[in-house]
């Protein structure tokens, strides 16, 4: 199932990440895609906050992976944009198929390493800072998409 929502402010990103944070489970995989600067890291920052992580989350572009240990679920934040340049790291599987929550910026670059079942989030910047966010998931991820869809269904975005 797929749903599309419109967001405009950081508050909207905060709200969306809060809803998703309520559905996380061990081994959860969230793939993020969208142009440079579309808000992938920003979304992850809010998600980390809702997961109870107090450390300041920075973009892992030059490290590929940052691990945030947490009392409940650990967060593995990846940005695979420069993976080919920096070097393919097979150890990423250990995290992706581990017991934490993996958030992968530019996930289409490693699609072959990823399971079919995961939450796919695509952010598209339209004019005037308006962003269209497409959220897709099946199986264990279906309920999240349904939840987001029902919460936003009757909201008409008035710029
Ligand atoms: N919902 C939003 N409303 C307003 N500004 C936003 C929103 N989301 C992100 N931004 C702004 O866009 C800029 C880029 O965001 P961010 O670094 O999260 O993008 P990114 O998709 O991770 O980029 P990259 O592809 O380089 O990793 C930041 O200055 C951020 O504050
Ligand atoms: Mg980023």
Image (tube, rainbow, N blue to C red):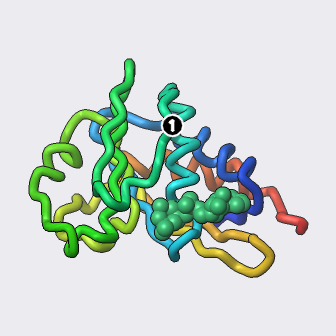
| Quarter location, residue 76 | top left
Q: Is residue 138 visible?
A: no
Camera-nearest residue between 1 and 115: 115
Residue 149 placement (x, y as % from top left): 63, 55
- Residue drawn at point x = 17 percent, y = 63 percent: 113
Looking at the rendered image, the quarter that the C terminus falls into is bottom right
- Residue drawn at point x = 58 percent, y = 69 percent: 38
Q: Is residue 76 left or right of residue 56?
A: left
| Quarter location, residue 67 | top left
Residue bearing the label numbered 1: 56
Residue 7 placement (x, y as % from top left): 72, 61
Residue 13 placement (x, y as % from top left): 66, 52
- Residue drawn at point x = 48 percent, y = 42 percent: 57
- Residue drawn at point x = 61 percent, y = 39 percent: 18
Secondary structure at badge 1 equals loop
Q: Residue furthest left?
A: 90
């Amino acid at each position: 199932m797929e749903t599309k929502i419109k967001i405009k402010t950081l508050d909207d990103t905060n709200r969306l990440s809060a809803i998703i944070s309520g559905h996380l489970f061990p081994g959860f995989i969230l793939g993020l895609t969208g142009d440079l600067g579309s808000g992938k890291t920003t979304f992850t920052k809010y998600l980390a906050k809702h997961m109870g992580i107090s450390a300041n989350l920075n973009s892992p572009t030059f490290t590929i992976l940052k691990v945030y240990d947490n009392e409940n679920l650990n967060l593995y934040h990846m940005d695979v944009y420069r993976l080919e340049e920096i070097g393919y790291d097979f150890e990423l599987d250990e995290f992706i198929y581990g017991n934490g929550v993996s958030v992968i910026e530019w996930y289409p670059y490693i699609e072959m390493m990823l399971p079919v079942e995961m939450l796919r989030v695509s952010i598209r910047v339209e004019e005037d800072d308006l962003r269209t966010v497409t959220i897709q998931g099946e199986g264990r991820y279906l309920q999240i998409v349904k939840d987001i869809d029902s919460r936003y269904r009757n909201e008409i975005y008035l710029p």
